[in-house]
Image (cartoon, helix red, strand yellow):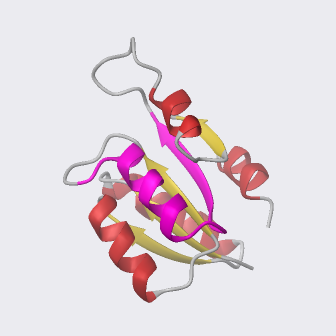
Amino acid sequence: MANILIADDEYTIRYGLRRFLEQKGHTVFEACDGEDALSIMASQPVDAAVVDIIMPNKEGVETIIEVRRQYPNVKIIAMSGGGRNRDVDFLKIAKQCGAQDILRKPFTNEELLKILAF
């Protein structure tokens, strides 16, 4: 089982993913933005981080870059529903910045499990 961080500014998404992953035996930490995510990672060992792209304070791409630099062994999954400007492929940018995998919202719990592969 793994320690997984969910970083998303939407409480319902964090809550739903946490409940599902805990039922699968994982330990889950929740962060409401990138600053919160990095703070948690500084105090808790994390095997994977599922990071939303559009968040307040510290957005996802910036968070992914910092996680990749500070914690090179953490698996990073970027997720996004597209944001305000659908002409920009935020998930492609996230992958170029260090995310190993991407998920387009809405996605299924099974899609997340397959990508996590713990």
Where is residue 113 drawn, in percent x and y? 73, 55
Q: Which residue sits furthest front?
A: 69
Question: Which of 103 and 93 lies nearest the eye of the viewer?
Answer: 93
On screen, residue 68 above or below 23? above
Identity of the residue drawn at 43% across and 63% down: 15
Residue stretch in magenta: 58-80
Q: Is any atom of residue 107 visible in this view?
A: no
- Residue 107: % across, % down: 60, 38
Q: Residue furthest left?
A: 57
Q: Is residue 72 magenta?
A: yes
The answer to if 81 sits in the magenta stretch is no
In the displayed structure, 83 sits above or below 68; it is above
Q: x%, y% of residue 93? A: 49, 31
- Location of the N terminus by quadrant is bottom right
Residue 38 left/right relative to 2 = left
Q: Quadrant of residue 30?
A: bottom left
Q: How many marks?
A: 0
Q: Residue furthest bottom?
A: 43
Quadrant for the C terminus in the image: bottom right
Kindly identify the residue that appears in the image at 37 percent across and 55 percent down.
12
Identify which residue is drawn at 58% across, 38% down.
95
Residue 57 appears in which quarter of the rendering? bottom left
Q: Residue at x 52, y 42 (%)?
A: 97
The answer to which of 50 and 110 lies nearer the viewer is 50
Where 47 sits versus 96, above or below?
below
Check the image and report above or below for 8 versus 70. Answer: above
Residue 92 percent across, percent down from the top left: 55, 28
